[in-house]
Image (cartoon, coloured by chain):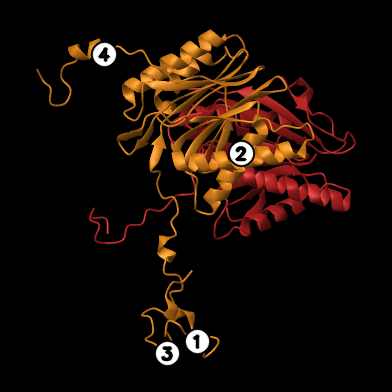
Chain colours: A orange, B red
Amino acid sequence: MDHFPTSWGRPRTEAYDAYNTFPLHQRPNPGHKDAFAEGVQRTQQPIVTGTSVLGILYKDGIMLVADTLASYGSLARFKSIQRLHPVGSSTVIGASGDMSDFQYLQTLLEELIIEEFAEADKHELGPAEIHEYLSRIMYGRRSKMNPLWNSLLVAGKKDGKRFLAYVDLLGTTYSASTIATGYGAYIALPLLRTAVEGKEDTLTEEEARKILEDAMRVLFYRDARSLDKYQIAIVNDEGVTISEPKKIETEWGFAEGIRGYGAQIQ
Amino acid sequence: MPDGSYAHPQQRQFNPYTENGGTILAIAGADFTVIAGDTRQSEGYSIQTRYAPKVFRLTDRAVLAVNGFAADGNMFVKKVKQRLEWYRHAHAKDMPLRAIARLIQTMLYAQRFFPYYVYNILGGIEEDGSGAVYSFDPVGSYEREACRAAGAAQSLVQPFLDNQIYFKNQQLPPGQTRPLHLSLSDVLSIVIDSFTSATERHIEVGDGLEIYVVLAKGRGPQGLEAVRGAQELTTNAEGDRVFIVRRELKKD
């Protein structure tokens, strides 16, 4: 909408020119149609962000974990944001990156699930379909040079089959038995691979939970954008369960003994 | 102006591309073609997954290998497969290889000003029963060749193929002529050696190897029955036949 009456041209009736706009001075740049064109912005960088999400396969299903922090740059802005989100009855997604883009994706998925429910044909979208849908959305938006700034994990179990896959702002997708986004890909993934690869079909729920909790503790020690409060999502034959937020047990005693970093030389 | 001040408008451009590593390779024989690719997908120094296929069976006589930006690659293969399905429904037969090659050129050039960042190698059997390899650049320039390597380790593998397939820089003993076409077992050895060597020297190559073999209609298995783990994917026993051979590569 152009809010400058002078750009609206000659009134259609002589009687109607309430603003007395014609003939008046020309606007400096008549070629400029929309005064707010420069206000149309695309996501050039994430603003409120979530850090890593980790996901592993275990004997009975898949586990995702994410902390509950949404940062504003280096400011720990929102300390109780849920970054794991159930979709349908057999899928859960975990998001890192821009939290407003993630909330937009949640509304899209909600719409999708309602449409599918309304069909009432006893079909349900499983994790593979949700992942395909998300990857098409993400790739479509990157192709419009207007990306949704997220790295997402999609996990689920349907018809006895476990599913764990990744999609990001470029539309890049892949599947593996252990996946981590963000800093987790550097810090936690090597630990997860050592603990999980080759043991996907034998790890118990307790063992898997322990592996993820240990990885989250290492991340909290080293990732400056992380929090010691996390949630775990489990998908197994019973469906999706997302835990209440839990605290990471930490031990900082060793810090006393560290000498020689930065300004502290004594 | 990159002086850190806010005096001038700042524009940060979103980069819609990335490189996902890996290498692909195809060699044509007299009546067969071998198309191969490793299965590692990486970004920067991180391995994203150890199994993401880059080589796809299109028809019983055509196999497409795609390398570069994985998201573009997957989308491109999806669209090529869709066009081939439409062709099948319209004409009640599979599209011939040279027609698929021209289709791929058209589809790539259609994106000339926002290209699919992928290098394609199409391999298979021509209508005359000869093995063929077509290689493409990201905007659709293509040619038919006897062999081609593309991707992260192209610069390591292609000179090796020039030497082993085209016999470049080889002095043959007097009176001896070089064979016009190599046997399937020789080609398979060269392919496997290419990938083990590329894995040694290139960090983005490794994990697994998928080798597709397309045999012309009515030809014998050419020693393929002796190859460990060869698995037939053919849907129509009367026509050309497609096989897949999987091998492990080093994972470090």
Between A66 and B207, the residue placed more toward the observer is A66
The secondary element bearing badge 2 is classed as: helix
Q: Which label belongs to residue A110?
A: 2
Q: Tag 1: residue type?
A: Arg
Q: Specify the subunit that label 2 lies on.
A: A
First in residue order: circle 4 vs circle 3: 3
Where does the image place residue B249, in percent across and percent down from the top left? 57, 23
Q: Residue lying farthest left?
A: A266
Instruction: Please rate how many residues cluster around mark 2, counting C-alpha atoms within 10 Å: few if below 14, some from 14 to 19, many from 20.
Output: some
Is any part of residue B248 visible from this angle? Answer: yes
Q: Quadrant of the N terminus of chain B?
A: bottom left
* N-term-proximal mark, 3 vs 1: 1
Report in which chain the residue with disc 3 lies. A
B166 to B247, vertically: above or below = below
Q: Residue at x 71, y 56 (%)?
A: B102
Circle 3 sits on which residue?
Answer: A23
Q: In the rendered image, which residue does mark 1 sit on?
A: A10
Q: In this view, does A253 lie to the left or right of B57?
A: left
Q: Is residue B162 left or right of residue B133?
A: left
